[in-house]
């Protein structure tokens, strides 16, 4: 008795009902991993394996009532004519297209078409492979490549000898190179520093590395870059290359320098205020002593000598402070009286300077 026809959802090797070819041929045909369809040169389908039935969601009878043009999106009689001429000339044609399932859902496929002669009649033998996952992976790779290529951060991939295999546009711009960096050496990016040997040591140790580096440019302007390096491994966890990223931090460095300059100016203003206060004390003593000396009577010799000594001490204090200010290398302020500092009150602070 004939074997029952298999369910379209359950692959069963070599059990599909067909009169095309001998049993051995059918056993081989039904066990093919790809969806396989045999059609006349005019496109009329005469046989299909279980895999093709599962792909296309038709029953066997429904599928064999169709033409190849019904399942290959956009195909027509001209397509079949081209296929026939192609297989007779080259014996093999590989095409990428979309197939249409019974529910009208399209899916990407790769179809290998070659001629097949059975019982003296020539047919088109089509092996259909669903490449949905491959196409999704390719689209993802394209998206990633586009993102890396257009990223503002410079990206460089180099082998373990330092030879650059890939560099995006930002990397070339940061390094001041108009031509592609591919083929250059990583050392070329740091010609005046020992950065590359340090990076290579870290990569070969299997560790990440990051530092702020001053990179020279042809225009003479300094370029501060945050450089990060990471080891790249293959599926077997073998070290194959290094990936470097370059982030321009020149604006941040300039902002820090501007803040430091503003801070220095603020300290200078505070120090000048404290200096005036500091100089005011001996100046006041000197002025008071001189006024009193002008009023001292000639017979009060002891008081006169006391006032003269006080004036000399005040003048000496002024001389030392002015000399110290002349040799300043660093300005800062400190509490006038220990433990009596009041933030924001200039009169509570005096100038503390470091002379060269």
Image: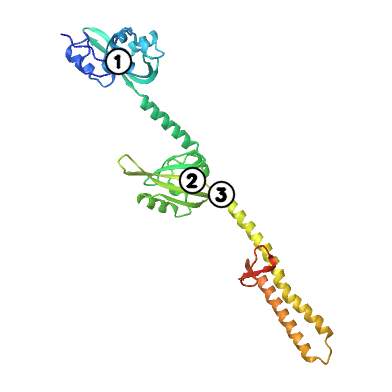
Q: CA distance from mark 1 to mark 3?
A: 62 Å
Q: Nearer the viewer, mark 1 or mark 3?
A: 1
| Secondary structure found at label 3 | helix
Quadrant position of residue 298: bottom right
Which residue is identified by label 1? 53
Quadrant position of residue 45: top left
Toward the viewer: 15 or 99?
15
Q: Are marks 3 and 2 in contact (CB under 8 Å)?
A: no
Q: Is residue 40 visible?
A: no
Which residue is identified by label 3? 250
Q: Is 312 left or right of 219, judged from the image as shown?
A: right
Q: Are marks 2 and 1 in contact (CB under 8 Å)?
A: no
> Which residue is located at x 71 percent, y 82 percent?
313
Q: CA distance from mark 3 to mark 2?
A: 12 Å
Q: Is residue 243 visible?
A: yes
Tag of residue 246: 2
Q: Is 331 left or right of 174, judged from the image as shown?
A: right
């Amino acid at each position: 008795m004939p074997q029952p026809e298999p369910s379209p959802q359950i692959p069963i090797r070599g059990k599909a009902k067909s009169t095309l070819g001998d049993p051995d041929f059918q056993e081989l045909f039904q066990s093919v991993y790809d969806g396989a369809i045999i059609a006349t040169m005019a496109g009329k389908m005469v046989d299909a394996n279980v895999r093709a039935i599962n792909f296309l969601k038709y029953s066997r009878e429904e599928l064999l009532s169709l033409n190849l043009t019904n399942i290959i999106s956009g195909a027509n009689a001209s397509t079949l004519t081209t296929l026939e001429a192609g297989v007779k000339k080259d014996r093999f044609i590989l095409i990428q297209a979309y197939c249409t399932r019974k529910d009208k859902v399209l899916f990407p496929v790769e179809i290998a078409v070659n001629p097949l002669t059975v019982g003296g009649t020539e047919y088109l033998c089509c092996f259909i492979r669903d490449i949905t996952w491959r196409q999704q992976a390719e689209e993802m790779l394209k998206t990633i490549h586009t993102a890396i290529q257009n990223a503002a951060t410079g990206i460089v991939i180099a082998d373990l000898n330092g030879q650059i295999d890939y560099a995006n546009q930002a990397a070339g711009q940061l390094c001041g190179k108009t031509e592609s960096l591919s083929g250059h050496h990583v050392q070329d990016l740091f010609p005046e520093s020992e950065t590359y040997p340090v990076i290579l040591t870290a990569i070969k140790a299997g560790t990440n590395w990051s530092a702020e580096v001053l990179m020279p440019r042809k225009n003479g302007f300094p370029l501060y870059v945050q450089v990060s390096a990471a080891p790249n491994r293959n599926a077997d966890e073998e070290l194959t290359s290094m990936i470097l990223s370059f982030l321009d931090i020149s604006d941040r460095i300039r902002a820090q320098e501007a803040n430091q300059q503003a801070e220095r100016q603020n300290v200078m203003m505070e120090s000048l205020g404290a200096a005036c206060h500091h100089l005011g004390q001996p100046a006041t003593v000197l002025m008071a002593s001189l006024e009193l000396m002008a009023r001292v009577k000639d017979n009060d010799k002891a008081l006169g000598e006391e006032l003269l000594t006080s004036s000399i001490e005040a003048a000496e204090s002024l001389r030392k402070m002015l000399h110290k200010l002349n040799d300043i290398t660093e300005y800062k302020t400190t509490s006038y009286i220990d433990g009596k500092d009041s933030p924001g009150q200039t009169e509570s602070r005096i100038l503390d300077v470091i002379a060269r």
